[in-house]
C-alpha cells in the first residue's frame, strides 16, 4: 500500500498539490501573456486578467473545498483522541471555525479580483491569511497539549517553526504594504500590474510580494505535517433508513447500512 493510500493522508497531499498547481498554472499563463512581470507578482495578480483569472478562480474554489475537508478531518481526529479534555475541546472547536473562515476567504479571493471589487478581494485575503494564521497557531497549541501522550515532540516543534515562519512573513507583508499603500507612492497602485525597478516603492512592493509567497509556502508546509497524522484515521458514512420504501407510511425499523466514506475500489 502506498503512503497516500493509508487512511486519509491523500487529503492534505491533494490540498497542497492542487493549490500549488493553481498558483503555478496561473503564474505561467499570466507571464506568458505579459499580464504580469515574471519577478514576484502578487499571487492574486496572476489571476486578475482573463483567461488566467478563470483558471485561478476555478482551481482555488476546489482548493477551498479540499481545505474544508482537511480541516474537518483534523477536527474529528483531535476530538476522537481527546474527547474529555476541556481545553483541547475548546481549542479544537476554535480551530474548526477559524479554518472554515479561512477557506471562505480563499473562495472570496478566487472569485473577486482586486481590480474589480477591491474591498471584497482584500476582505478575502484578510480572512485567508489572518484566520489561516490563527488556525495554524491554534493547531500548534493543540500539538503542544497533545504531546507526548498522543504524538512526539518533533511534530510540535516543526509546526511551531512553521507558525514563526508564517508570523514573520505576515509582519513583513503588513508593514511594507501599509507603507506602500499609504499614498506616498501613488494613488492607483491597486490597478498596477507591472513594476519597474525605477518606480517609487519598488523595493517595498518586492518585499511585500515575497512575504506573501513566503506566507503561502508556510501554509503548505503546515498542511503537509498532517500527512502522517491522517494515515491513522478514516471516516465512514452511516445511512439510517426510516422505511423500506419512499411512500408516506409509518416508519419501520430497518438494518443500518454502514460504508466507508470513500470506497477503496475507486
Image: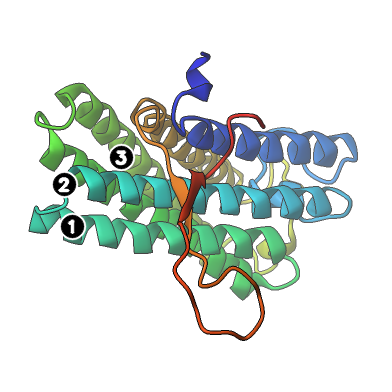
Is 27 placed left or right of 233 in the picture? right
Expressed as whole percent of the image width and height from the top left, the position of residue 228 reads 36, 25
Residue for point 51% across, 72% down: 242
In the rendered image, the vertical position of residue 80 relative to residue 6, given as above or below = below
Residue 178 point in image, percent of width and height: 46, 61
User: Which circle, 1 or 3, is nearer the viewer?
Assistant: 1
What residue is disc 2 on?
82
Query: Can see residue 21?
Result: yes
Q: Nearer the viewer, residue 21 or 2?
A: 2
**Spatial separation of the CA atoms under disc 2 and disc 1:** 8 Å
Q: At which x and y percent is residue 46?
A: 74, 46
Q: Earlier in the sequence, mark 2 or mark 3?
A: 2
**The one of 23 and 104 positioned closer to us in this rendering:** 104
Work out whether 138 lies above or below 241.
above
Q: How far is disc 1 from disc 3 in space, using C-alphas?
A: 21 Å
Looking at the figure, which quarter contains the C terminus? top right
The span from disc 2 to disc 3 (Cα, nearest Å) is 23 Å
Q: Earlier in the sequence, mark 2 or mark 1?
A: 2
Look at the numbered discs 2 and 1 and tell me whether their residues touch, using CB distance below 8 Å. yes
SS for callout 2: loop
In the drawing, what numbered circle is on residue 89?
Answer: 1
Q: Name the residue: 40% across, 46% down.
A: 73
Vertical placement of 264 versus 44: above or below?
Answer: above
Q: Are marks 1 and 3 in contact (CB under 8 Å)?
A: no
**Residue 153, located in which quarter of the rendered image?**
top left
Can you tell which mark lies on residue 163?
3
- Mark 1 crowdedness (10 Å alpha carbons): few <14, some 14-19, many ≥20: some
Amino acid at each position: 500500500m502506498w503512503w497516500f493510500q493509508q487512511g486519509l493522508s491523500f487529503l492534505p497531499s491533494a490540498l497542497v498539490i492542487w493549490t500549488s498547481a493553481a498558483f503555478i498554472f496561473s503564474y505561467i499563463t499570466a507571464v506568458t501573456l505579459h499580464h504580469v512581470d515574471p519577478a514576484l507578482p502578487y499571487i492574486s495578480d496572476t489571476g486578475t486578467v482573463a483567461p488566467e483569472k478563470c483558471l485561478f478562480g476555478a482551481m482555488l474554489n476546489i482548493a477551498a473545498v479540499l481545505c474544508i475537508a482537511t480541516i474537518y478531518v483534523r477536527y474529528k481526529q483531535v476530538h476522537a483522541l481527546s474527547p474529555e479534555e476541556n481545553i483541547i475541546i475548546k481549542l479544537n472547536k476554535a480551530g474548526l471555525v477559524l479554518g472554515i473562515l479561512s477557506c471562505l476567504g480563499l473562495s472570496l479571493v478566487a472569485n473577486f479580483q482586486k481590480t474589480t471589487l477591491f474591498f471584497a478581494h482584500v476582505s478575502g485575503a484578510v480572512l485567508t491569511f489572518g484566520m489561516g494564521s490563527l488556525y495554524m497557531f491554534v493547531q500548534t497549541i493543540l500539538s503542544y497539549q497533545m504531546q507526548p501522550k498522543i504524538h512526539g515532540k518533533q511534530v510540535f516543534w516543526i509546526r511551531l517553526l512553521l507558525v514563526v515562519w508564517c508570523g514573520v512573513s505576515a509582519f513583513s507583508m503588513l508593514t511594507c504594504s501599509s507603507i506602500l499603500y499609504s499614498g506616498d507612492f501613488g494613488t492607483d497602485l491597486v490597478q498596477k500590474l507591472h513594476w519597474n525597478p525605477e518606480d517609487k516603492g519598488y523595493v517595498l512592493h518586492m518585499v511585500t510580494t515575497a512575504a506573501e509567497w513566503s506566507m503561502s509556502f508556510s501554509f503548505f508546509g503546515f498542511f503537509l505535517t498532517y500527512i502522517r497524522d491522517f494515515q491513522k484515521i478514516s471516516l465512514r458514512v452511516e445511512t439510517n433508513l426510516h422505511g423500506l420504501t419512499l411512500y408516506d407510511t409509518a416508519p419501520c425499523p430497518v438494518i443500518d447500512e454502514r460504508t466507508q466514506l470513500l470506497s477503496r475500489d475507486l
